[in-house]
Amino acid sequence: MHHYYTMTRSHKKMMRELAFLNNMIRALCLLVAIISIDGNAHVGNKECTPGGVCSDEGAEAGESLLPLLHERHFYINGTWVDPTPPMNTLEVIDPSIAEPIAIIAVGGQLDVDSAVASARQAFPAWSLDTSSEERRAYIERLLEIYLDREEEMAWLMTMEMGAPIDMSRSAQVESGSFHIENFLDALNDFKFQRTLPNFDDKESPATTILMDPIGVVALITPWNWPMNQIALKVIPALAVGCTCILKPSELSPLSAILFAEMMHDAGFPPGVFNMVNGNGPTTGAMLSSHPDVDMVSFTGSTRAGASISKAAADNFKRVTLELGGKGANIIFADVGSDLENVVTDGVEQCMSNSGQSCNAPTRMLVERSVYDEAVEIATMAANDHEIRSAHDEGDHLGPVVSESQYNKIQRYIQIGIEEGARLVAGGLGRPEGTNGRGFYVRPTVFVDVNNEMTIMQEEIFGPVLCIMPFDTEEEALAIANDTPYGLTNYLYSSDGSRRRRMARSLRSGMVEMNGLEQDHGAPFGGMKASGNGREGGIYGMEDFCEIKAVTGWDDDN
């Protein structure tokens, strides 16, 4: 039986207070490097430029610019280890200022082999000797630590991927704790042993169904919602008894390093959770093709998802994929006086996180009788967005994640113009006031598009909205389904019968109607080029299980 944390209520209170003081000290050290936007600051003997980039002449080349302990280490078998030589590195770029803030190591084959071997060695004891109640206790302790260090986590995500700090606090960080709490709830109802009714002979014993952990799982997560996706993969995998290797995006590794620190402090047994940094084509590919990995859970681009599936095929490992999207937001005229709110909310959903969400409603389909009015509303809503540094507090959009992402979005805006779409908001180039620093994109709206245009068919992954009219319910359905993707579609109508017809016919894993969001524990995932498998709640836990049918099981004998 593994050790896990048990504390009295007073002991927990004292530990939380000590942790709070310690984390505030760390957070203050972190903030010194980033809060000086108009002048210079200092971290130790490092000179910090406006925007928080720090250096000193005596520092070694490649010295980290943030006070992190383990940015060039991997977490393997319960300890922080150096990469296997020769060490390759990558810079972590703050997209608000387009300058490096840290350097991480890139995992090679020997690093991946070590992490997988550690997870393989830990699997029997974690899956068989540790009860679900014990695993729950570890996760509960993790949640306590996570909540104590939310401010650190928020700033790391702001600096590594560009979410404005208020959004990092309210959405990015809280998505992690939200999912951890939801999986703890799901664990209450999860049946590891089930009984299949015997319909042929009610007197004979029924078949017993065991939900066994699938084994060693590789978890490859994206940069756009770092903690959301890490929590959606790590927590259910460990909850059902799997062991894992996390490979976070090389664009957002700092928050994952902090998460690994939390896992260590929560006392998970060595080898149960491992983390190796690196990029997709090298470290990710090594994990995907590794013969001792039983499953890969990946969130990212459709192109990368195809590569992972091919790499995993030779070993017949399970692959679950949460990939791209091109969500349709279908608005019928019968919304009446709610049209302004519906369109404005649709623009906000599209632009949120600088348009870098796979389930963003990037295609707005509007019934023709209210189309012109909707275009006016959408134009005003897009132009109302303020663009500022992610370091600044307030309700505004920040940069996109990287220079390559910025260039990709600019290319799509140019294609939209060349293909004849009418530009009513935004456009090429950086917004005014950004002085050419950082990867800022103007919130952009194209109207009078058609479904043959590139910007209607391909995922842009930026703050770009396309608006198109339709005349009939059948036409709206045909346009919405005419896409390679199938993640989330949105629908607004006061006609309940129409909503139900459309929901059944829309080819997507999720349909949100009249602004109602999914309940906690609802399965998140898609179809077609948006991937397979489901995340969240009991459905997300089942994805990490093998189904075993057993006859002759007798609990009483």
Image: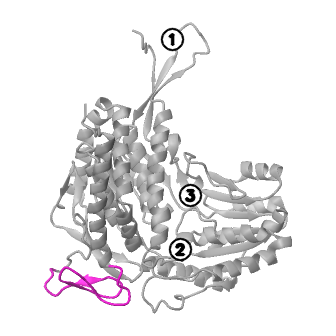
**In this figure, which residue is indicated by the disc labeled 3?**
529
**In the rendered view, would you say 386 is above or below 86?**
below
Question: Magenta part mainly helix, strand or loop?
Answer: loop
Task: Kindly state the secondary structure of the residue where label 2 is placed.
Answer: helix
Identified at 57% across, 46% down, the residue is: 522
**Percent position of residue 389, x then y:** 45, 81
Kind of residue indicated by mark 3: Ala
**In this figure, which residue is indicated by the disc labeled 1?**
205
Identified at 36% across, 84% down, the residue is: 51
Q: Is residue 279 visible?
A: no
User: Which quarter of the rendered picture does the C terminus lie within?
Assistant: top left
Q: Viewer-nearest of labels 3 and 2?
A: 2
> Could you say which is closer to the camera, residue 520 or residue 7?
7
Kind of residue indicated by mark 1: Pro
**In this figure, which residue is indicated by the disc labeled 2?**
354
Identified at 71% across, 61% down, the residue is: 480
The single residue placed furthest to the top in the displayed view is 203
Location of residue 29 by image quarter: bottom left
Horizontal arrangement in the rendering, residue 204 relative to residue 496 (left or right)? left
> What segment is highlighted magenta in the picture?
34-60
User: Which quarter of the rendered picture does the N terminus lie within?
Assistant: top left
